[in-house]
Amino acid sequence: MYGGFKLYGTILRLDPTVSKVSFVRLPDEEENYKPQYDKFDFAFGLKTQLDPSIGYFTVNYINLTVTPGKEREKSKKRLKYELCGDKHFNFDKKADIKAYGIDKFYCISDNEYSL
């Protein structure tokens, strides 16, 4: 099992297009997929508010591009987020958002991310 894992890691380093993740796309393929346009959304957080003296959340959009010479170019953009409330979580049944406590979680308020 360990040998198979090491082999997979070696192959992935040699050819970054080999991946089990389906979000890896070649530059000449279709444009980026924006899940928020298909009513996909997510929220994150803890059961209680995070004390700023202990830690904080950061949400980054990382774009990894592989050049024709097999070099990797990485860019990072910090995304804005705020409490979901009833306006930032994309779900039709607003009562369920409160019932499940999603309104107290954080949602990305910046819609400029894609897969």
Image (cartoon, helix red, strand yellow):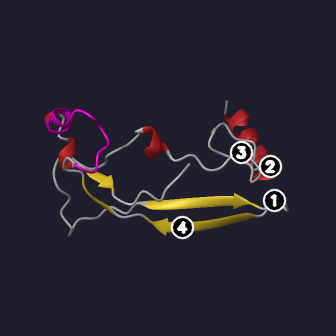
Do the CB atoms of the residues marked 1 and 2 lie less than 8 Å apart?
A: yes
Do the CB atoms of the residues marked 3 and 1 lie less than 8 Å apart?
A: no
Q: Amino acid at mark 4?
A: Lys
Question: Going from the N terminus, do you reach mark 1 or mark 4 first?
Answer: 1
Q: What percent of the width, then of the height, locates residue 26?
A: 74, 49
Label 1 sits on residue: 70
Look at discs 3 and 1 and give the one toward the viewer: 1
Label 4 sits on residue: 76
Q: Amino acid at mark 2?
A: Asp
> Is residue 10 rendered to the left or right of residue 1?
right
Question: Going from the N terminus, do you reach mark 3 or mark 2 first?
Answer: 3
Q: Amino acid at mark 1?
A: Lys
Mark 4 residue element: strand
Instruction: Report the label total.
Output: 4
> Is residue 67 rendered to the left or right of residue 110?
right
Relative depth, front residue between 92 and 21: 92
Give me the disc on residue 15: 2
Question: What's the residue at 64%, 38% (across, down)?
Answer: 22
User: What's drawn in magenta, residue-wise?
Assistant: 87-98
